[in-house]
Amino acid sequence: MEIKDIKSVYFVGAGGIGMSAIARYFLHKGLPVAGYDKTPSTLTRQLEQEGMAIHYEEDVDAIPAVCKDAASCLVIYTPAIPSGHKELVYFREHGFTIEKRAQVLGTLTRSHKGLCVAGTHGKTSTSTMCAHIMHQSHIDCNAFLGGISKNYGTNYILSDHSDYIVIEADEFDRSFHWLRPWMSVITATDPDHLDIYGTKEAYLESFRHYTTLIQPGGALILHTDLEMKQEVQPGVTVYEYSLDKGDFHAENIRIDNGEITFDFISPVECVPHVELGQPVPINIENGVAAMAMAQLNGCTAEELRQGMKSYGGVDRRFDFKIKNDRHVLLSDYAHHPNEIYQSAKSIRELYRDRIITAIFQPHLYTRTRDFYREFADALSLLDEVILCDIYPAREEPIPGVTSQLIYDHLKPGVKKSMIHKEEVTALAESRDFDVLVILGAGDLDNYVPQIAKIIESK
């Protein structure tokens, strides 16, 4: 189904970050948009306020009449929805066009210049930075992001004139193979989603295939020293970037009194004295990648500076809730060992002389099984680690796989304990934490507002 033929859109699994961004795209186009989700959330309530009809029971009769014409209704679903879902079965049996959200994004990259950011970690921050730089520049952009931008209070940016579209390219379920990028950053290829890929080699091969999809005339911006092999089409320029080496990198980094500045080194034009609006050490490298892609598409040196200085961050990505001399509380979506390592390293750099505690909720049994030693090593950078039960997401329990595996492999000297997530508020009341970080991609973040109130009351 071509974009021009769509008269209504229905979402099976409406409340996810990525799905809701596409829902907003079609709402902005003025089309009737409806859908199902398992549970109400802040995001689904916002979508309802914006005009989307959402119900929360698996019920074919609840599908609006305007979404029951197979010739004009596009059905978009998330792979997290079981294949036997009653509504999905109905659409399948009645000949509807049914697409994953990644297929829809792929269609948009064929009609726009897609600026895509892929990688095991760093892609949400990097794509959101790039989108912000582009949007506040003379070029502008549309954007579909994997997190809520604090600058815009949404995961979606709309432009009425820009031909550019910034997309977070998700490797889960090989979704990014539907895209046809004009340019792409690849931030990291540390193995993940082995429940889908099976082996590290298959995971790396998936990224190699992704690089073949970049359009001639475009560019690939790779982090240095990645294990993957790239295979671009003729006419695609390949660049490398990192913190301190490659075609694009940072020099003269200055971290002082809560502020970070650096010089952006580029083969196009070097930009001195870039100031980070969200002064977190890991954002230096993310910023280098974001500025590289924005600069290659025409952003000026001053626009790069202004974009980086005014960048406000992403919800749940090194997200400060309290920040003063007595208490620090932050929430971070980090759920892969290397993300945990980068987060812990950045916190340690910012708070060298303070006691840092992490409450970590592992995400997925398979990921815990595959990487429990690496999780323990990364968490051992901190002073204290409090582990919650594994968040199962789409998985059934695996015998013998619990948070205890991580607990048992934490390094000597790290204070450690295990609790149930329901106990975190009582824990916050009983303790006086110095620097506290809530880590993980599950539902532990739901308790952060209560924890913040408790800490502030002290």
Image (cartoon, rainbow, N blue to C red):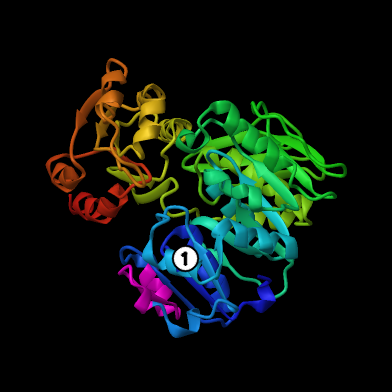
Rendered view: 157 above or below 217: below
Residue 261: percent from left, percent from top:
60, 42
Q: Bounds of the magenta span?
A: 44-62
Q: Is residue 152 visible?
A: no
Horizontal relation, residue 320 to residue 275: left or right: left
Residue lying at 24% horizontally and 38% vertically, measured from the top left: 389
Quadrant of residue 410 in the image?
top left
Horizontal relation, residue 385 to residue 216: left or right: left
Reading the image, the residue beneath label 1 is: 153
Rendered view: 440 above or below 456: above
Residue 231: percent from left, percent from top:
77, 35
Q: Is residue 55 magenta?
A: yes
Residue 89: percent from left, percent from top:
43, 64
Residue lying at 34% horizontally and 42% vertically, measured from the top left: 395
Kindly identify the amino acid type of the residue bearing the numbered disc 1. Answer: Gly
Secondary structure beneath dot 1 equals loop
Q: Residues within 10 Å of mark 1 (few under 14, many from 20)?
A: few
